[in-house]
Image: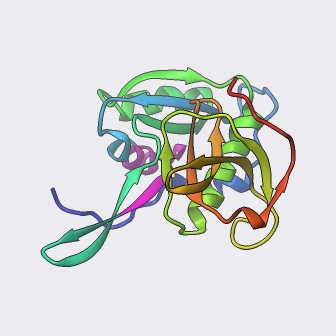
Amino acid sequence: MPILPRESDRYPENLFSIPPSAGDEEQPRWQVLHTRPRQEKSLSRQLSSARIGFYLPLATKPSLVRGKRVNGYLPLFPGYVFLYATHDETAQAFDVGTGRIVQRLPVLNQKKLWADLSQIQKLIDTEEPIHPEESLEPGELVKVKEGSLAGLCGRIIRKASGSRFVVALDFLQRGASVLLDGSNLIPTGSYAPIE
């Protein structure tokens, strides 16, 4: 399978500068689309072509192909595309994504999902090597005080590979992490249990 160049991970490009709407059905709302396996990128291409708002967080995966180092781009949360659409656009998304979407998961707390996704995108923007966290572990709540991750809030967990800073996507009970030096962190709480 060929390694494709990086594609747009969202539509519109200014998606994270748009604050979530306050309940008006005519306004776009965040929803989560659960997709069939390996259909996330195809669905995002179709949504982009139809000009329907979406976000597909992508993590860089370096590979060696015929002795040459290349980067692939894989969904950070396999099986999920985040839709930002009106009621009519949601129906249209199911039409353009025929056979790719398993189900739509409604999001009750729009502001929380928007905030979590914004933090995930900031983590991706740093271009640090990102590790997907399939399940969230308890850890100390912290805020990064300086550097490329300044202002991000998350958990610090200890693993054999070192201390990892985890940005959570609570809606899916998953997250993304990077290795981080603990001297750059400010504790914001003693402990974050998994809810």
Segment tinted magenta in the rendering: 44-61
Answer with the quarter of the image where residue 182 lies.
bottom right
State whether residue 118 is above or below residue 136.
below
From the top left corner, tell me how far across and down residue 168 is, in percent: 64, 41
Residue at 84% over, 39% down: 190
Would residue 55 be seen by someone viewing this image from the given angle?
A: yes
Towards the viewer: 22 or 95: 22
> Measured from the top left, where is residue 117 in percent x and y?
64, 46
Rendering coords of residue 80 (x, y %): 46, 35
Is 160 displayed left or right of 165 in the figure?
A: left
Q: Is residue 36 left or right of residue 22?
A: left
Indicate whether 5 appears above or below 34.
Answer: below
> How many numbered marks, from 0 up?
0
Residue 98 position (above or below residue 157):
above
Magenta-drawn stretch contains 55: yes
Q: Is residue 40 magenta?
A: no
The image quarter in which residue 124 lies:
bottom right
Q: Identify which residue is drawn at 24% across, 63% down.
A: 3
